[in-house]
Image (cartoon, rainbow, N blue to C red):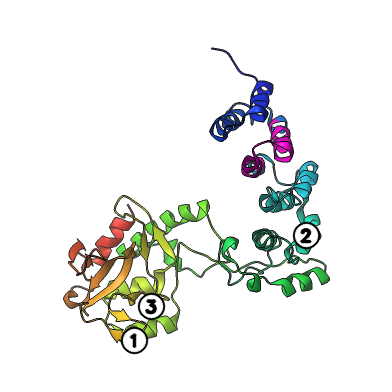
Amino acid sequence: MKIIGREELERKLFEETDGIKFSRHKDKLIKLFAESEREAVIHAFMQYAREGGLKHWRGFLMTDILGLVQEGESAYASFFKWALTDPATAYWAVDGFLKTAGPEAYPLLVTMATDEAVELAVRANAIKCLSVHSQQTFDSGLPADPGYWKPEQLPVQALLQWQEEGYPQGIGYAPPVTHPALLEPITPLENLAAKLEKKLAKLRKQRYDKANPDNHLVVANENDLVRITEKWTLPETYALFLRNFSPLHVQIDGDSFEQGLHLYGAQELIARQSGYSMNTVTNEVIPEWPLHLLVIADDGGDPYCLDLSVISNGDAPVLYSQHGIGYWEFEKAADSFIDFLKILTK
C-alpha cells in the first residue's frame, strides 16, 4: 500500500473542489501528522483559511486550527488577528486570538464587540469569550449560546467601563451551593444522589457555562420550598431530595428516554405543571388532569409524575404517560421515587 506523505495530502487539500473529499483529506492530515508534525499541519490549515477555494471550509477549518494550537502560542496570534477581519473566519477567530494573545487581545475585541457595524454573532461571541477569559460577568443573565443574544442585550456600557478601568480580571461566578452529603453520603437517598451527581459531573466536563450552570444537584431556595409545600403534601423522600439535592437544569440522556429526561428542581416545579394540571394563560385547572399527580420530570413533554394519592413509608410511585394523543393513559415507571432515582443513575 502506498504511503501518502503530508505534502501530498496538503496538495490534495488545496486542489479539492468536493467538500466531502476535502473533509476526508483534512481528517487524514490530522490523524497521521497532527502529533508528529503539528506546526506544519497548523501552517497548512491557516494558509487554506486565508486562500482556500472552498469558502465554507475556510470557516470550518478554524475549529481544527483551534484544537491544534496550544494556549499561549503567541506566534499564531497574528493569524487570528487577521482572521477577525474576514467574515468567513471572524467568529472562530475570537477564541483563537484570546488563546494566543491573552489579555493583549482585549482592546481589539472590545472595539469589535462595541461596533454596531460588526456582525451581531461575532460581537456576541467576542463578549462571551471575553467574559470567560477575564472572569468578568458580562454574560450574566444571557443565554449560554451567544447566537441567541439580541443587539439590545449586549452589555456595551459595561465593556466600555471595563476598558476605561484598564481591563481588570474579575472573580467569575460563584459555583452553585451543594449539600455535603454528595461527597459523604450515608443514607440510601444520599447514596443515589451522590451517584447521580457523578453522572452529571461527566456531562459538565463535556459542556459547561459558568454563567448558566446546569446539571447540578443544589440546595434548594427556602422560598421555593415554602411555595411548594403550600400546594402539595410531598412524600418525605421526595421532599428531602428537593431540599438537599434540587436539580438545577438537569437533562439526562439514556436508552430509557427518547429525547432526554428533564428532571425538575424546586425553582421550576410549580411552573412546570403548566400544560398538565394548569393552564397558565387562564390560570385555570385543566379538568382532564388527575390532581393527585405531580409532574416531576418530562421526556420531550411526556410526563413522569409522583402519585400523591398512595404515599407509603415516606415515598410514592412514579407514573408515566405519553402526551399529544388526546388523553392521558398512565403506567407505572417505578414503584417509588427511590426506584426512579435508581433508573436515572444507571
Q: Which label's residue is closer to the chain start, 3 or 1? A: 3
Image vertical order of residue 275 relative to residue 189, above or below: below
Reading the image, the residue beneath label 2 is: 106
Reading the image, the residue beneath label 1 is: 283
- Which contiguous range is marked in magenta? 41-65
* Residue 203 on the magenta span: no
Question: What type of secondary structure mainly makes up the magenta span?
Answer: helix
Reading the image, the residue beneath label 3 is: 271
Q: How many marks?
A: 3
> Could you tell me if residue 165 is visible in this image?
no
Image vertical order of residue 136 relative to residue 133, above or below: below
How far across and how far down the image is residue 326, in percent? 21, 69
Residues 201 and 89: in front is: 89
* Residue 58 on the magenta span: yes
> In which quarter of the view is residue 238 placed?
bottom left
For badge 2, the amino acid type reads Tyr
Q: Nearer the viewer, mark 3 or mark 1?
A: 1
**Spatial separation of the CA atoms under disc 3 and disc 1:** 11 Å
